[in-house]
Image (spheres, rainbow, N blue to C red):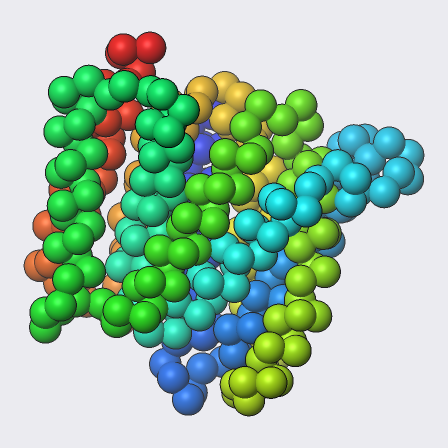
Amino acid sequence: MRLVLLTALTMMAFAANSVLGRMATGSGATALIDPASYSAVRLLSGAAMLWVLVIVTGNGGKGKALAPSGSWGSAFALFAYATAFSYAYVALDTGTGALILFACVQATMIGWSLREGDRPSRIEWLGLITAFGAFVWLVSPGLSAPDPLAAAAMALSGIAWGVYSLRGRNLADPLKATAGNFLMSSAFVAPLAVVVLAAQLPVHASLRGLALATLSGAVTSGLGYALWYRALRQIGAAQGAIVQLTVPVIAAIGGVLLLDEDWTLRLILSSLLILGGVAMAILAKQRRV
C-alpha cells in the first residue's frame, strides 16, 4: 500500500508540472511569467531542493560539491527539456502537451534501443506503429490540432527528456546525480538570458508566476524525482514506464478541473491509441526479455 501511494504521488507530481507550466506561461499577453524566467526559476529551485535532500539523506559526502556527480551532457539535456517545455505551454492545452511530451520520451528511448540492435516482436511493432500513427494524427492540421510550433517545442522537450533518461540509466546514486545535473543546468540560464534579450522577447514575472515556477522546481520536479527514484527501485523499469503513461491522463484531468480546458474527440482517441500502443509494446518486450 505504501508503494502504491508513493507511486501515485509521484505521477501526480509529474502531471502537476504540466498543469503548473500551463497555468503560469499560458494565456498569451496575460501570462503570469515568461517562459525563459519560468525555466530559470524552475531549474534553480529544483537544484536547491535536491541539494537539501542530498544533504539531509547523507549522500553529499560531508560538504563535497554536487556538480561532479552530474555531467554537462545530461545537464544540457535537462535544460533543453525545461526550456522547450515552458515555451510549448504558451500555446498548448495541459493534456495535449503532456501527451506529446511522454509520447516523445518513449519514442526516443525505444528508438535508441532499436539503434542498439534490439529487434521487436510483431506485437511490439503493432503497438509502436499504432502509437506513432495516432501521434501523427494528433499533430496533423485540422480544426482541433494543436499549435504546430508549440507541438514541435514539446516534441523537442520530450526528446531531450528521453536523452536525459537514457544517459541516467544504471546510475549508482541517481539522487545525487540529479542534484548535480540540476545545479549544472543553471549555468545555461545566462546564455538563455542573452538570447532572450538579443531577440527582444518579452520578459515579465508576477509574484504568482514566480511562486508557480518555484513550486514546480522545488516540489513537483525536485521532490517528485526523488520520490520517483525511490519507487523505481521497487517496481522496476518496465513497470515504471507503463505507470508513467497515466501522467498525460492525470494532467488532462487537472487542466479540465483547474484551467477549464476541454477534451476534444481527437485528443481522447489519440490518447487511447498512443498510450495503448506504447503499453502494448512495453508489455510485449517485457515478456520477450
**Image check: 156 left or right of 174?**
left
On screen, 173 above or below 133? Answer: above
The quadrant holding residue 162 is: top left
Q: Is residue 45 visible?
A: no
Answer yes or no: is residue 165 visible.
Answer: yes
- Pick whichever, 168 or 9, lies toward us: 168
Q: Quadrant of the C terminus?
A: top left
Q: Residue at x 50, y 34 (%)?
A: 166
Residue 98 falls in which quadrant of the image? bottom left
Count numbered badges in the picture.
0
Q: In the rendered image, which quarter contains the N terminus?
A: top left
- Point out residue 15 in the picture as x, y percentages from the top left corner: 40, 51
- Left or right: 99 with respect to 186? left
Residue 201 drawn at (x, y percent) = 52, 85
Name the residue at 37% across, 59% down.
154
Q: Position of residue 151 (x, y in %)?
A: 30, 63
The image quadrant that residue 256 belongs to is bottom left
Q: Determine the residue positioned at 14% across, 42% down.
A: 273
The image shows residue 37 at horizontal and vertical percentages of 59, 74
Where 6 sits versus 268, above or below? above
Residue located 72% across and 52% down the image:
183
